[in-house]
Amino acid sequence: MSKVLLINGSPNEHGCTYTALCEVAASLEKNGIETEILYLGKAPVPGCIACGRCRRDGLCSFGGQVNGIIKRIDEFDGLVAGSPVHYASASGQITSFMDRLFYAAGRKMRGKVGAAVVSCRRGGASAAFDQLNKYFSISQMPIATSVYWNQVHGNTPEQVREDNEGLQTMRYLGENMAWLIKCIQAGKAAGVAEPEQEKRVATNFIR
């Protein structure tokens, strides 16, 4: 069975971000896609320090939840990054988590379906949404879309549940993500070859 990991990057385990992610998860489950929600917790999440260990053995030197997901990465066909909006950006927890996860295992993400979900009281959602999508767009991941930017509005879970447009956006996101995952799997089963990979070229802008 296909499976999607949904990351709750809010310090509040069952807050607004969780409410949005649950709506996405319900649509995925309805379409036969298994889901798992990972809560990052309230403790500070260390950021990447460019130590290079992950380039040697594929694991982050800080360990923790990042390495837990790296070791299980083949279980997941898709990833949803969810975050509250903090000063028009994603939360510090999920930013540090995603920096380390994608620096260590970004090449293993190729072909998995990605999506970002953000929750805000009022403004800044588009900027945070754009920030999270950049992890997927640099890692050869198809990005699932919806009928509007993937955002919900409210200061409490109860208020989010009153955001009918936001919740509908989450449901469409889950439907479209399930469809993309199934299309990719059908293509593989039919023998459609994955895109050819060239040797990576890294060019610095100092001559």
Image (cartoon, rainbow, N blue to C red):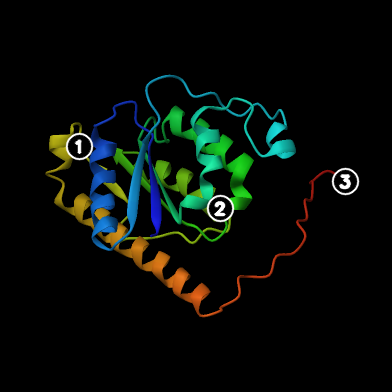
- SS of the residue at dot 1? loop
Please tell me whether mark 2 or mark 3 is closer to you in this view: 2
- Depicted 204 relative to depicted 121: above or below: below
Question: Type of residue at label 2?
Answer: Met
> Mark 3 sits on what residue?
207
Structural crowding at the residue carrying mark 1, measured as other residues with C-alpha within 10 Å and reported as few (<14), some (14–19) or many (≥20): some
Q: Which mark is residue 154?
A: 1
Question: Type of residue at label 1?
Answer: Gly
Residue at x 56%, y 79% (from the top left corner): 191
Question: Type of residue at label 3?
Answer: Arg
Please state if 156 lies on the left or on the right of 182 as rendered.
left
Please tell me whether mark 1 or mark 3 is closer to you in this view: 1
Residue 21 image-quadrant placement: top left
Q: Residue 99: image x %, image y %? A: 56, 36
Please state if 90 lies on the left or on the right of 59 as rendered.
left
Tag 1 and tag 2, C-beta contact below 8 Å: no
* Alpha-carbon span between mark 1 and mark 3: 50 Å
Q: Earlier in the sequence, mark 1 or mark 3?
A: 1
Q: Which mark is residue 109?
A: 2
Name the image quarter holding the N terminus.
bottom left
- SS of the residue at dot 3? loop
Q: Residue 128: image x %, image y %? A: 41, 41
Structural crowding at the residue carrying mark 2, measured as other residues with C-alpha within 10 Å and reported as few (<14), some (14–19) or many (≥20): many
Q: Residue 63: image x %, image y %? A: 57, 27
